[in-house]
Image: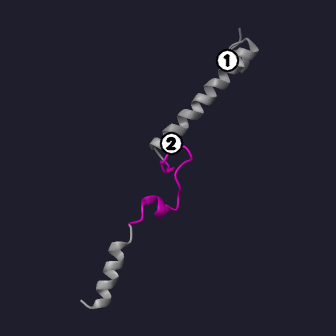
Amino acid sequence: MNSNTETNQDIQSTEPAQTESENKNLSPSATTNDIPEFGWSGYAERINGRFAMIGLMAVLLVEALSKISFLEWAGIISK
């Protein structure tokens, strides 16, 4: 080996390896260190659960303010 090849190998070994987030140029979420990704991931499940909780609270609020069930309010069933 020549000295130029040895120098290049030394430089490569001292540089920190890039993480997956640096390769994709994505940053973590504001609330977690998870990287957003498609498919079945912990991040996607957490976001889905949060939106489900917001939807449930909206249904309960509609029922509390209108004094009738959500299904009647939405016209799905009639009494």
- Name the foreground residue: 73 vs 47: 47
Quadrant in the picture for residue 72: top right
Residue 65 in picture, x, y percent from top left: 75, 16
State which region is magenta: 17-38
Is residue 75 in view from this perspective? no
- Amino acid type at circle 1 is Leu
Task: Using residue 23 as the reference point, say whether residue 6 is left or right of it.
Answer: left
Q: Is residue 2 left or right of residue 34?
A: left
Q: Is residue 27 left or right of residue 78?
A: left
Q: Is residue 6 magenta?
A: no
* Nearer to the camera, 71 or 57: 57
Q: Position of residue 48 (x, y in %)?
A: 54, 36
* Residue at image location 53% in from the left, 33% down from the top: 49
Relative to residue 68, is residue 42 depicted above or below? below
Q: Which residue is mark 2?
A: 44
Task: Give neighbour class at mark 2: few <14, some 14-19, many 20+ (Cα, 10 Å).
Answer: some
Residue designated by label 1: 71
Quadrant in the picture for the N terminus: bottom left
Q: Is residue 51 above or below residue 19?
A: above
Amino acid type, label 2: Ala
Give the farthest residue toward the left: 1
Q: Position of residue 78 (x, y in %)?
A: 71, 12
Residue 39 is situated, as x and y percent measured from the top left of the image, at 47, 46
| Residue 8 shows up from this direction | yes
**Residue at 62%, 30% in the rendered image:** 54
- For the image shown, how many numbered marks are present on the structure? 2
| Residue nearer the viewer, 16 or 73 | 16
Q: Residues within 10 Å of mark 1 (few under 14, many from 20)?
A: few
Q: Is residue 46 above or below residue 39?
A: above
